[in-house]
Image (cartoon, rainbow, N blue to C red):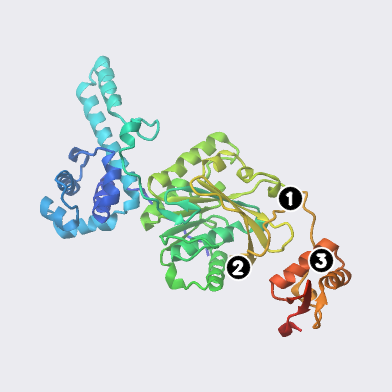
Amino acid sequence: MTAKPTPKVRPPDAESSERALIGAVLSDPERVMPIVAKRNLSVDAFSDAEARRAWGAIIRLSEAGRPIDPVTVASESGLPALTLQAMIDAGIPAHCEYHADAIRNAHFQRQAVAAIKADGDSPEGLRLACERVMQGLPSDAGGGGAVAASDWLKESDTPEEPVIKGLFDAGDRVAVVGQSKARKSFYALQMAVCISAGEPFLGYETERMVTLVYNGEIKASSYRRRLRRMIEVLKIGADKLSGLHILNGAEVDTPATFDSILAEARRVKAGLVIADPAYMLIAGDETDQTAVKAAVTSMKKFGAAGITLVCVYHGTKGKMGDRQAIDRIAGSGIFARDMATLVSLVEHASEVDHAVMTTITRNHAPVEPVSVKFTDGAFSVAGHVAAIEKTSQTKATRAISIEDLAACFRTEPTSYGDTVATIRQRLGVGRDRAKDEVARAVREGVAHAEQSGRTTLYSIRTDMA
């Protein structure tokens, strides 16, 4: 059966943005109004009649220091409560910056067309009209024009909005990089599951939010089985995943782009988007600087809309552990340096089904690398395993099972020296490795250590004898 192509979703036009912005203001005026105020949107900037009336009422209430809420705005504007409620349903506070920019840009466009029509009959008139239009346009330098630092510092700071506390925040761009054996796609899906359910993710607290995952490589049926197995291991019920949306792109005819995914994110009102893998959304080779810069420009639109973007990248060829974390993404180095947070997953030096999770974050305190273990379809933190990445210099270490290790201990207490000697003889390892295995046996509850004077005696735990 041929899969149906994913329908194209058009981004909201300026008129839709006008109503959505009103809804965002009414939903959270304390958060939205300071952001929108920077755009200096007059009533003339609104073309939709009802949005125009509502915005006029909001401006008057704001100037008078009166509360901005649906009841007060309805009374001030004369609009029905149902009309304002429809605007609230269409508006998301986190998207207010995008909608305000869309309204402002449409307003400038209308002014430009009117000016050129009025004075553009002659070449000189056209030149003067264009000059007037250009003087009124906002600058692209610095995201809307330079501001005086003295004025800028008078503005209140925007409160932090963590997505994964200590790792990244709302509107950030995040990179997850790993080679195939590191299971980065499982890692990304687990991140999406935990955030959409509001559950901890590998020791980090999360902020619950609507999440959209673009799956570009794995068949939908296989991805669904993977998701079922994962939530069973994590003990997260399917009823908690109403905010998780999967956009399967592996079997569709129309390729996705960052812009089409952003439009879909707005449609489902997602606060977080995971693009797995990111290279499939680039219009060209991932080493082509022109294509990469165009892709990064598209990525930045997510932040402007208040949406966090997590991109999953393939790692470089060879041993990733040989490189600094910032240089592990295959292709252009622009990707890593553009991100607010980078997470790398590298094979563990000795432990099977383990990876070392290393994070580099621009806006949070440094975090030590940790080992994570993949079991039955999900990751868990392996805090007892040292975070040692596999490199070209790392020697392979033979894995010793718990059963083989337990067989080295006796029921009667034995001195440390005799215990080390027994492990060396029975398991064929060196002295240092034998000492490590003694410590591991105690740490994992295989053996019991007791003090006898100045000597430590070791014996097998009674329930394992």
Spatial CA distance of label 3 from label 1 is 23 Å
Find out whether the residues at labels 3 and 1 contact each other: C-beta distance under 8 Å: no
From the image, tell me which residue sits under label 2.
377
Pick whichever, 186 or 367, lies toward us: 367
Quadrant of residue 83 within the rendered picture: bottom left
Query: Horizontally, is 347 left or right of 198 in the view?
Result: right
Q: Determine the secondary structure under disc 3.
A: helix
Upstream in sequence: badge 3 or badge 1: 1
Label for residue 412?
none
Q: Nearer the viewer, mark 2 or mark 3?
A: 3
Q: Is residue 347 visible?
A: yes
Frontmost of labels 3 and 1 is: 3
Disc 2 from disc 3: Cα separation: 32 Å
* Label 2 vs 3, first from the N-terminus: 2
Indicate which label's residue lies in the foreground, 2 or 1: 1
409 with respect to 41 (left or right): right
Amino acid beneath label 2: Gly
Looking at the rendered image, the quarter that the C terminus falls into is bottom right
- Residue located beneath label 3 in the image: 434
Counting labels gives 3
Q: CA distance from mark 2 to mark 1?
A: 25 Å
Q: Earlier in the sequence, mark 2 or mark 1?
A: 2
**Residue type pointed to by label 1:** Thr
Counting other residues with Cα less than 10 Å from the Cα at mark 2, is it few (<14), some (14-19), or many (20 or more)?
A: some
For the point 40% across and 30% down, the residue is: 141
Which residue is the site of mark 1? 391
Please tell me whether mark 1 sits on a helix, a strand or a loop.
loop
